[in-house]
Image: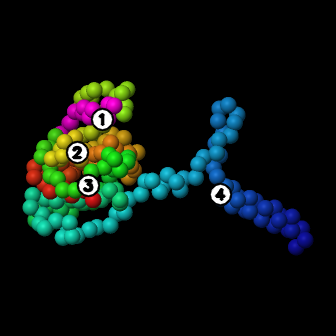
Amino acid sequence: MAENWPHALSRRLFLGSAAAGLAAPAVAQTGTGTVDIERDISTSVRRNISSFRTLDWHPYFSDTRKGAILVDLTSRALHYWSEDQSVYRLYPTSVPMTEDLTRRGRTEVVRLVEGPDWRPTPSMLERNPEWPPYIPPGPDNPLGTHALHLSWTYYRIHGTHDTRKIGRRSSNGCIGLYNEHIAELFGVARRGTQVLII
């Protein structure tokens, strides 16, 4: 039994140091020989959360005529109900970066575009003068594959090719969806679909 003592101790030391290593911040060796410490990922997770709980349409709409879309900016989720309520969809979204870019209230879908092109608004170009004045449809277009234009000028529900934006405060005012989700929504929404952004 005494001969097993060093083995048992070294095993405990190994397990203890392994547990401590898991609890410590991750480190990465750079090509220059310096060591960078990665930041705590919990801060990233807090900015990228969505509350995926189903909702009933009744508290938000008097009916579902032409369908209804509810965008909850706090939970970063879009809810869709078809006119006859047989279809319900729940999607994660990107939302405006700041309150001054955010618009809340009732609007409706006025136009549906597959393969949208994009022109930054005058205020976007003022904030970002390096941006091009026009981007045609395609993989570089920030509106993704489909766009639902709202009755508010410049506001849309659209796709994005940059999937890192979904679940975050990352837009200049619009509501963004994964391209596969905006394609689904595009297939069921129509002109006149009610939209409420809260």
Is 5 placed left or right of 186 in the picture?
Answer: right
Q: Give me the residue at 26% from left, 34% from top.
A: 121
Task: Return the disc, 1 or 4, that comes first in the chain's sequence.
Answer: 4
Q: Give me the residue at 25% from left, 32% from top.
A: 119
Amino acid at pointer 1: Ser
Task: Return the disc, 4 or 2, that comes first in the chain's sequence.
Answer: 4
**Which quadrant of the view contains residue 52?**
bottom left
Q: Which residue is mark 2?
A: 156
Q: Which residue is mark 1?
A: 123
Could you say which is closer to the camera, residue 12 or residue 134? 134
Nearest-to-viewer mark from 4 and 3: 3
Q: Position of residue 136 (x, y in %)?
A: 24, 29
| On screen, residue 74 above or below 113 | below
Task: Return the disc, 1 or 2, that comes first in the chain's sequence.
Answer: 1
Q: Secondary structure at mark 1?
A: helix
Q: Which residue is mark 3?
A: 104
Please report contact status of discs 1 and 3: CB closer than 8 Å, yes or no: no
**Which quadrant of the view contains residue 163?**
top left
Q: Which residue is mark 4?
A: 22
| On screen, residue 8 above or below 141 | below
Other residues around mark 1 within 10 Å, as few (<14) / some (14–19) / many (≥20): few
Tell me the distance, in whole angstroms, between the alpha carbons under discs 4 and 2.
44 Å
Q: Position of residue 196 (x, y in %)?
A: 21, 58
